[in-house]
Image (cartoon, helix red, strand yellow):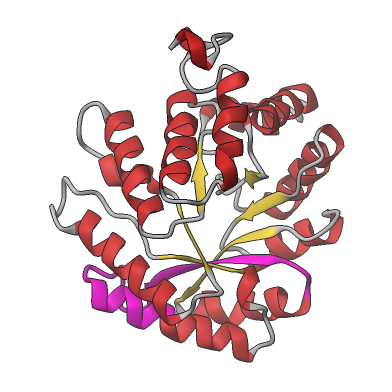
């Protein structure tokens, strides 16, 4: 599972304040905490500053990469901000995200195709957000074929079938899961990624719903997620689900997480004989 740590997002007041004050320590500490918790990418987002987004996104990239050994996920629909951040990024970033909306597609495709990167392809278009399985699959097929024709490698494409809240429509969770399975059957070499917290929007005990949906999604092939890696229960659920669906050879990641006390704090330090 590719974990994208979501916490350095300017929509969060503390992060917004740190960006405004150019507080490198705050940003570095939050990036390092996510790296330690198991993130593979650190999402950086400065979208609440539309006029200064290119400058601030580049600054975030520099601070994160000085503090960690991780690449960044460049979280913006603004091609100028993505371009500026790419110019200072060391190595290949994850670009989040392109969509089939014409303006966004036309502006971001050249950047993604002509610079080493991985790319999240969000299943939405100028017709709006999809509601059905079929709409998601149709959008994904057009995007993946377009990206491949532009020269991108299938392994660098992460399709996001778009999670929507079940409080709005009880079928949204099932439609996402079915569509994801269809997309991965059509394109076995691409990946599936999502930010899944929208599934629980408007409902109580959201973390329970998020963890349960994550387990269901892993069972359907999800191999990337934009989440809070400091949520230990979520990270434990991911480790367990990947083990149970055969994505953890010899259960090594599960055992490593157990020995680190990352599965249940109450079990830290115990051996198999104790349980």
Foreground residue among 64 and 134:
134
Q: In percent of the image, x 65 and y 88: which residue is there?
A: 150
Q: In percent of the image, x 72 and y 55: which residue is there?
A: 54
Residue 260 % position (x, y): 62, 19
How many numbered markers are drawn? Answer: 0
| Residue 131 forms part of the magenta stretch | yes
| Residue 155 forms part of the magenta stretch | no
Foreground residue among 274 and 207:
274
In the displayed orientation, state which residue is furthest to the bottom.
149
In the displayed orientation, state which residue is furthest to the left.
170
In the image, taking residue 168 as reference, residue 222 lies left or right, namely right
Residue 25 % position (x, y): 78, 22
Residue 199 % position (x, y): 29, 46
- Res 221 seen here: yes
In the image, taking residue 211 as reference, residue 170 lies left or right, namely left
Height in image: 138 above or below 29? below
Height in image: 15 above or below 198? above
Foreground residue among 88 and 241:
241
In the image, taking residue 33 as reference, residue 214 lies left or right, namely left
Foreground residue among 265 and 117:
265
| Quadrant in the rendering for residue 161 | bottom left
- Res 4 seen here: no
Q: Quadrant of the C terminus?
A: top left
Height in image: 241 above or below 256? below
Residue 182 % position (x, y): 34, 74
Give the magenta-colored segment's residue range.
115-140
Q: In percent of the image, x 69 and y 74: which residue is there?
A: 112
């Amino acid at each position: 599972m590719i974990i994208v740590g979501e916490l350095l997002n300017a929509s969060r007041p503390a992060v917004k304040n740190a960006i405004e004050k150019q507080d490198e320590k705050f940003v570095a500490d939050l990036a390092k905490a996510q790296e330690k918790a198991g993130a593979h990418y650190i999402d950086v987002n400065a979208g609440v500053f539309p006029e200064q987004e290119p400058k601030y996104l580049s600054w975030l990239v520099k601070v994160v990469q000085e503090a960690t050994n991780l690449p960044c996920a460049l979280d913006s629909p603004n091609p100028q901000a993505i371009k500026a951040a790419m110019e200072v990024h060391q190595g290949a970033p994850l670009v989040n995200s392109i969509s089939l909306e014409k303006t966004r597609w036309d502006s971001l495709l050249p950047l993604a195709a002509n610079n080493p990167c991985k790319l999240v392809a969000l299943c939405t278009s100028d017709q709006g957000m999809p509601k059905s399985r079929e709409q998601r699959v149709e959008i994904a097929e057009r995007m993946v074929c377009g990206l491949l024709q532009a020269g991108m490698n299938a392994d660098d494409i992460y399709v996001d079938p778009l999670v929507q809240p079940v409080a709005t429509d009880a079928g949204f969770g099932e439609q996402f899961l079915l569509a994801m399975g269809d997309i991965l059957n059509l394109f076995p070499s691409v990946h599936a990624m999502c930010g899944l917290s929208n599934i629980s929007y408007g409902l109580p005990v959201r973390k329970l719903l998020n963890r349960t949906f994550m387990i269901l999604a892993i069972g359907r092939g999800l191999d990337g997620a934009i989440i809070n890696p400091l949520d230990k229960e979520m990270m434990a659920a991911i480790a367990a689900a990947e083990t149970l669906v055969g994505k953890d050879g010899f259960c090594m990641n599960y055992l490593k997480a157990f020995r680190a006390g990352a599965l249940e704090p109450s079990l830290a330090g115990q051996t198999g004989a104790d349980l």
